[in-house]
Amino acid sequence: MSEKGIFPARFLFYIITISMFLLILSSVFLLQFGNTSLIPHSVFNLILLNGTAVYLKPSVKNEQIKLPFLSSKSSQVDAQIKVENGEPSCQKLSYGKKMCNSWQQKIKSCNNNQALLRVFMYDLPPEFHFGLLDWKGKSDQMWPDVNNPSRIPSYPGGLNLQHSMEFWLTLDLLSSNTPNVVRPCAAIRVKNSSQADVIFVPFFSSLSYNRHSKLRGKEKVSVNEMLQNKLVQFLNMRDEWKRFGGKDHLIVAHHPNSMLDARGKLGSAMFVLADFGRYPIEIANLGKDIIAPYRHVVRTIPCAESAPFDKRPILVFFQGAIYRKDGGAIRQELYYLLKDEKDVHFVFGTSQGNGVNQAGQGMASSKFCLNIAGDTPSSNRLFDAVVSHCVPVIISDEIELPFEDVIDYSEFCIFVHASNAVKKGYLLNLLKGIKRDQWTKMWEKLKEIVQHFQYQYPSQPCDAVHMIWEAVARKVSSVQFRIHRDNRYHRSEHKK
């Protein structure tokens, strides 16, 4: 080939090489400095690649960090009724992947660029939140001093505690602007709603239902209903609600009977729920809402105290209400099938007296713990089993599980269709067929995932609070999709 033919070929090669380099460089630049784009901050941080969540670490190197299946970090405490440290979680963790962002470690200060989610929280009067805990601040004080845990009002115990998500999420947002509180930078409270990915409504709706749903004295309207009516009026007057019809608002209504009077009027918002058992699909669904774990009521078993297969004499454990309505009728059928079987503990129980301690001891001594549908598809019994390292057996066909887009529950739970569970001999034969090695694998998984179901203050990496914020962040893109779709004809229709 002549030199004249070689020169254009080389020139063309150099041009192509330089063009490819500039294209790659510009792509990296856009990813690194895309904060000023129209893409929401939380959506920008969470990019889906081949079905796997990848986070971009805010550093010069643009390091990619996979959002994994399960975490390898340990939880600091098992949250008590009072805000205080408890026992450490399991330290031996073997998962190679990590559930949460590894860059969201505990830090003393968190800014808008670091946080996965920017949240605007309404300054509602205390009657909607900590006032329900009998907290009284100074005349101009809206919130308690979260910098000092001893000044934070305690959440009531017993079964009230299982629906306390609103309490922990509100505390976490308040602490995000509080110096010296060490927490993950998952969510940060912003003062300007135009900067927010999500608008948080700090109404302790479950506590309001539990404490104030009944008429007292000469009341014609319960305090619970009155607060819901006032909340609807408040939101309907807010520009933040009017802007997108409430689609970017987050409301916690974990108790299945909370927000009964207002849920239909506020159904465009994202809800944090226990399940969808008492909601029509147009009000609550997986497309927009978040399923959050119950707060367990039995104590977390430390790994060092967790009994292995051979030291758990009870094969199957259930203690709770047996006669339930609707889908919970299966409990009665299973009771008559199993109550007289060897190595089976199936008895009526309540949270009264020493019931919770007895249930905790029983679960910690059992290989399998039944989680059967009751009045609703879910209950805190599942999470009591998890923290007791008792392999859950889920018999609830309509159940929805927290964080199931990133957690594979089949690795540490047994699922049984209700129609099969009531067949004579089916359930026991299935569970007896699970040998020591197979059970031990599930037991080890349980010890590793416990931290994802712990509520505590301050929040810790990969605990329940952190996981809820990440679940909300994963919904932001779908919220934006709904908003943009609804805006298709907004301009042309308003010109008529």
Image: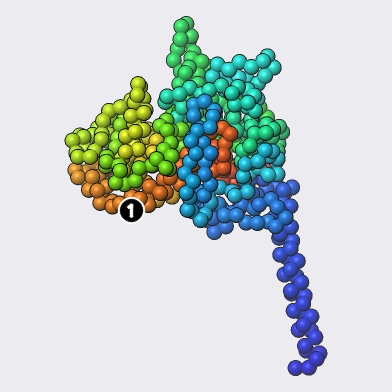
Is 248 or 135 nearer to us in this picture? 135
Residue shown at 69%/32% (left/top)? Answer: 179
**Can residue 229 be seen by looking at this rendering?**
no
Q: Residue furthest bottom?
A: 1
| Rendered position, 492 above or below 347 | below
Q: Residues within 10 Å of mark 1 (few under 14, many from 20)?
A: few
Q: Amino acid at mark 1?
A: Gln
The quadrant in which residue 365 appears is top left
Instruction: Name the spot of residue 121 as percent of width and height, x first.
Output: 64, 30
Q: Quadrant of the C terminus?
A: top right
Q: Determine the secondary structure under disc 1.
A: helix
The image shows residue 459 at horizontal and vertical percentages of: 57, 36
Residue with the most extreme front position:
304
Mark 1 = which residue?
Answer: 438
The answer to whether residue 243 is above or below residue 72 is: above
Identify the residue shown where x is 67% and y is 33%: 180
Q: Where residue 128 sits: x, y (%)? A: 57, 21
Residue occupying the point 46% across, 6% down: 217
